[in-house]
Image (tube, rainbow, N blue to C red):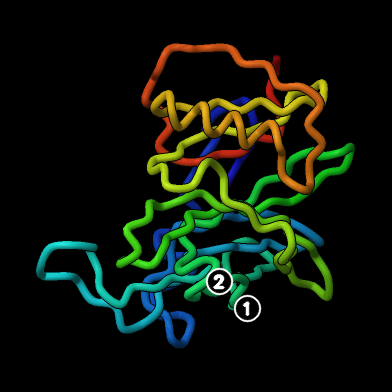
Amino acid sequence: MISEPMTGRLVQRIDSEPLVAPGAVPGYGPIFNAGLIHHDGRYHLFARGVRDGYRRNPGSGPRFLDYRSDVLLFVSADGRRYEFQKVLAAGGSTPVYSYEDPRIQQVLSAGRRQLMMTYTDLPEPDSGLPWRIGMHRLVYGDGAFHLNRTSGRVVGPPGVPDKDAVLFNLHDGRVKIRVEGNRQAIDEYLHDLEAGPPLARIERISVTPVPYTGQYGDFIIRFTETR
């Protein structure tokens, strides 16, 4: 929770107990790794919910067996007490086997502010495919957020693991992306950028090599930058 900006302590814990307890939603155990946004006078919490029935793998292979997680949506009037509203995104055999770690960001696209949800797209464990980063545009109606089903995309070339990136709008309306990874993956990623997703209009791409830092362990979208 953000307190007074730019002065004193910027972040503080608002409660010693979880805002949403494990098992708070029937059919789900752990509920965690959430994103939060305030919209239409209420707080909307997007969380990873792990379905009941999973177990730790005693042998080799994935850490858990029969693991599947979805995006659960909770709402609150005061930011402290949350009620379960709906399953926003449920994993299936296609196109997303399992959703993890939803993050909600506001970005500027074609002169309009859009709400986007990014998440980790987990493939079926036996597929041998890497984790990927997925994106969906959100629409709001009847007091709840919904996925725009035609806007779902994965970021980066298929078959390449460890795609970590940072995406944010510049003040002049351009979009800046910082990507770290092996050269082949980045070259393929740039090729995808030139085509662009359906919601964007790509006019020009400029590339500036920068030293590798290793600091990006997740996918993050920021709305503005000072320069």
Q: Please tell me which residue lies in front, 196 or 217.
A: 196
- x and y, in percent, of residue 1 in the image: 57, 48
Amino acid at the residue labelled 2: Leu
Circle on res. 21: none
Q: Could you tell me which residue is drawn at 51 percent across and 42 percent down? A: 157
Secondary structure beneath dot 1 equals strand
Q: Count up the numbered dots.
A: 2
Q: Could you tell me which residue is drawn at 25 percent across and 68 percent down? A: 64
Q: Please tell me which residue lies in front, 12 or 150.
A: 150
Circle on res. 86: 1
Residue at the limit of the structure toward the bottom, as seen here:
26
Amino acid at the residue labelled 1: Lys
Q: Mark 2, residues whose alpha carbon is within 10 Å: few (<14), some, or many (≥20)?
A: many
Q: Could you tell me which residue is drawn at 76 percent across and 58 percent down? A: 39
- x and y, in percent, of residue 136 in the image: 66, 56
Circle on res. 72: 2
Residue 29 is left or right of residue 25, and the answer is: left
Q: Could you tell me if the residues under marks 2 and 1 are in contact, i.e. CB atoms within 8 Å?
A: yes
Secondary structure beneath dot 2 equals strand
Q: Could you tell me which residue is drawn at 36 percent across and 25 percent down? A: 214
Residue at the limit of the structure toward the right, as seen here:
111
- x and y, in percent, of residue 135 in the image: 62, 52
Rendered position, 193 above or below 97: above
Which of the two labelled residues, at mark 2 and mark 1, occupies the earlier sequence position? 2
- x and y, in percent, of residue 62 in the image: 23, 63
Which quarter of the figure has residue 41?
bottom right
